[in-house]
Structures are given as structure tokens and as C-alpha cells.
Image: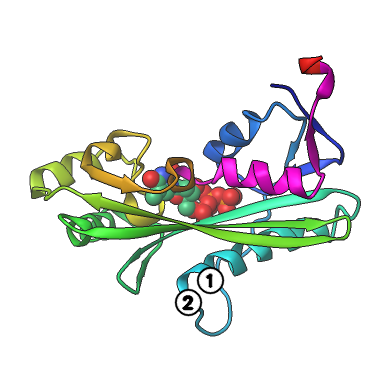
Amino acid sequence: MKVIANNKIILASESPRRKELFSRLGVPFEVKASGIKEEIEGELPPEEFALAIATKKADEIVQRNKEAIVIAADTTVYLGETLLSKPVDNNQAREFLRALSGKEHRVITGVSIRGAGLSIGFAETTTVTFYELTDDQIDAYVATGDSLDKAGAYGIQTLGGMFVEKINGDYNSVVGLPLSRLFHTLLTLNVIQIDKEDFL
Ligand SMILES: Cc1cn([C@H]2C[C@H](O)[C@@H](COP(=O)(O)OP(=O)(O)OP(=O)(O)O)O2)c(=O)[nH]c1=O
């Protein structure tokens, strides 16, 4: 299957995982990091919060690239109603992983699509259940340094995946980008299309 882009697309992200996932569509795109503070005024429910931060990331890039379609995402981890963002250090990473041990949590990725007259977004929720973890397992994982750039202090796509007993929802969304939902949304918006020549 070949996919064509009908617009200039910018992925507003410095995450190598998002870049790798989005590149699977095979359409040209640029990467520009927005560098915003991942904060908003007031409190929002989890899905609205993830979407609001993603929108803030996208808007910052749209201002400087008015002709492009800008896509941004934000991945958050919630244990109950408690937000576990990227840990500030290894001590906090250990705390997060001890809290997640043996329990179910939500990974919510907000995706914002802005620019060229478009303003649309969604939040994808995936439920992840962790095995009971020992302190030795947590210490050994945190010592790899993998926790620090990841919400909830683990990467499902790396050794952190060994902690996962089950997942209900989109795996790619946990890694940082709900690619198939984004694909269908971009098709509906006519930002991309499937190349008909490809199957004639
Ligand atoms: C739960 C989980 C999160 N993560 C990552 C995805 C996100 O990159 C990161 C959460 O931080 P985000 O703020 O969503 O993204 P980012 O700062 O890495 O990149 P940018 O804002 O420039 O787009 O956690 C994993 O890679 N694997 C996982 O299993």
C-alpha cells in the first residue's frame, strides 16, 4: 500500500519513537520540536489534559509554519487519577515503578492536528497491567537509564516491556503515537490518501 500526502506535514516532536512510527506511513514529513512547557493552567480530566498539551505543542509550530499541517502528540500515564509524567531522576523512577507494580494503569496519548484550516484532535486510552515487581527488578531496569525520557518511567518497547502482563488497546499509542487511528483520521481529513496507481 502506498500513501500520498496532499499537504506539507510537520511532526512537532523530538521523540525518535514518534518519528519512527510516523515514517511507517511512507509520506514525506519534516520534524520540528516545539519546546513548550508541558503545563497548562487549571486542572483537566486525563484525556483532555493529554489533548491540551498536544495542541499546545502543535500550535507553537503552526504559528511559524502557517501553510503546513502540524501533528503533535503527548503521552501521559495515569495510575488512578494520579499523573505519572517523566520522572525527574532515578529515585522518582523507582517510586513510579513501585507504584505501578501489580496494578493496572492508563496510558493516554493526545494527538493534535492543526494548521491549513484544520483544528482537530483525539485522545487514545490504552490500559496496561504490570506484573508484581521486585525491588531488584526495578533497580536493575532503572540503572539502564531507560526510564528518564518516558512517561511512567518505563518503555513498553524496551526492557520495560518485561514488566507488562497485559495490554488492552493500541500498543503504538503507549510507545507515543496511535498510528492507525491517526492514519484513519488523516485519510478522513484528506490530508493523505491511498495511491490508486498502486493497486491498478
Ligand atoms: C509509557 C511509555 C511512554 N513512552 C514515551 C513516549 C513519549 O516520548 C514519552 C512521554 O513524553 P511526551 O511529552 O509525550 O513526548 P516527548 O517529550 O518524548 O516528545 P515530544 O514532546 O517532542 O513529542 O514517553 C515510551 O516511549 N514508551 C512507553 O511505554
At horizontal 32% and vertical 46% (from top left) the residue drawn is: 167
Answer with left or right where residue 144 lies relative to residue 62.
left
Which segment is the magenta one?
175-197
Residue 192 appears anywhere in the view: yes
The picture places residue 109, in percent across and down from the top left corner, at 51, 56
SS type, badge 1:
helix
At horizontal 31% and vertical 51% (from top left) the residue drawn is: 128
Distance from mark 1 CB to nearest ligand 1 atom below 8 Å? no
Q: Amino acid at mark 1?
A: Phe
Residue placed furthest toward the bottom = 42
At horizontal 77% and vertical 58% (from top left) the residue drawn is: 114
At horizontal 45% and vertical 45% (from top left) the residue drawn is: 170
Quarter holding residue 52: bottom right
Q: CA distance from mark 1 to mark 2?
A: 6 Å
Residue of label 2: 45
Q: Are marks 1 and 2 in contact (CB under 8 Å)?
A: yes
